[in-house]
Amino acid sequence: MGSLNLMLNAQPAVLRDMKVSLVNTVTSEKREVTPFLDGTVQVANIEAGNWQVIAKHPNLIFDVINKPIRILPDRPTITRIPIPANIFSNAAIADTPDANLGPAQAKLAESETSARDQARKVAGQPIFADDWNALAATLGDTAKATGELATLVSPIGHDHPELVSKLSEIQGNLQTFYDLFARSLAELQRQIEQLALQRKVEAVAERVPTLPPAARERMFSAVEELTRAYQDPPSVYNLKKRNAGTVMQEELEQALLGVNLDGDAQSAVTDFRNVTGALSSGSATPDYGAELKQRQRAENASNSGMFIDAMRAVKTRTF
C-alpha cells in the first residue's frame, strides 16, 4: 500500500467546493476526498498502481482535472497539479477614486471675482492696459478651468477603464462557456452517432450472409475505436471518423461483389452506405462549434434517421 500527497494550485474560494475522486484504472476502486483550503489532498493506504484523478466543481459543467497518476509502492507519492485560474475569473469592478475638482472650482471662483471687479466701471471711465490684461487673464483662466473640469468629470471618449476591463472579462467568460458547452454537446452527439452506427453495422451483419466473419470483426473494431475517441479534439476525431467510414465501406463492397440481395438486405445496405459515405466524406473542422454546424448540415441533408435509430437502440438495450 502507498500514500498520496496531492497539491492543487487554486484559490481557497475555489477549493472550498471542489470534490476530488481517485479511480483505480485496473480494479475500478474509487476514493473520494475533499481538498483542504490550501489545496492539499492526502490519501493514506491507497493501492499502488495507475489511478485517474478527477476533480469537479459545482459551478462548472466539465471536469476541472481529469488526468492519470501513478501511485508508488515503496514511498509516498507527491504530485502537484496546477489549475488554470482563468476558468474561475470573477474580478470585482475596480473602485475608481473620485476626481479632485477643488483646484478647478477654486480657479473659476477667482475668475468670477476678477471679472466682477472689471464690471464696476462707469460710463466714460477709461479702460487701461492693466484692466484689459486682467480681463484677458480671467478669460484664459476660465477656459483652462473649464477644460480641466470636462476632463476630470468625463474623460475623453467617455471611457470607463474599470467597466471596460469587467466587460472584457465577461466576454472571455462567455467565450469559455460557449467553448465548453460546444464541446459537451459535440461529445454527446458523437456518442449518439456512434450508437446509431453500431446499429447500422449490426443490421448489415445480420442481413448480409456473405459478409465474412473477419470483415465483420474489422467493422465492429472500427466502431469500437471511434467510440473510444469520442473525447478527442475535432481534428483528430474527424480523421478517425473518415477512416472508420472508409474501412466499413470497403469491407461491405468487397463482400457484395456478385451478390443479389433481397428487399430487407438491400434496404439495410443502402442505409449503411448513406451513413458510411457521410462519415468518410466529412471535412476537417477546427473546433467544436464548426463540428456542430457540420453535423447539423449533414442531418438536414440526410434521410438516415441516425438520431431515431440511436434512441431505438437505447430503448432496446435498456428494456
Image (spheres, rainbow, N blue to C red):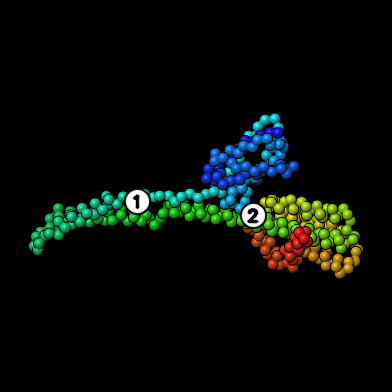
Residue 10 lies, with reference to residue 297, above or below; the image says: above
Rendered image quadrant of residue 204: bottom right
Q: Quadrant of the C terminus?
A: bottom right
Drawn side of residue 244 relative to residue 67, left or right: right
Type of residue at label 2? Arg
Type of residue at label 1? Asp
Q: Work out which residue is located at the far top of the displayed protein and give it.
A: 74
Q: Nearer the viewer, residue 195 or 238?
A: 195
Is residue 81 something one can see in this rendering? yes
Residue 47 lies, with reference to residue 170, above or below; the image says: above
Q: Which mark is residue 98?
A: 1
CA–CA distance between discs 2 and 1?
Answer: 44 Å
> Reading the chain from its start, which is encountered first: label 2 or label 1?
1
Q: Nearer the viewer, residue 34 or 184?
A: 34
Counting from the top left corner in percent of width and height, residue 88 is at: 54, 48
Q: Nearer the viewer, residue 281 or 289?
A: 289
Q: Residue at x 73, y 59 (%)?
A: 193
Q: Residue at x 69, y 41 (%)?
A: 51
Mark 1 secondary-structure assignment: loop
Q: Which mark is residue 61?
A: none
Counting from the top left corner in percent of width and height, residue 29 is at: 71, 42
Residue 2 lies, with reference to residue 110, above or below; the image says: above
Counting from the top left corner in percent of width and height, residue 76 is at: 65, 32
Is residue 196 something one can see in this rendering? no
Q: Residue at x 52, y 55 (%)?
A: 171
Rendered image quadrant of residue 307: bottom right
Q: Which residue is mark 2?
A: 183
Q: Quadrant of the N terminus?
A: top right
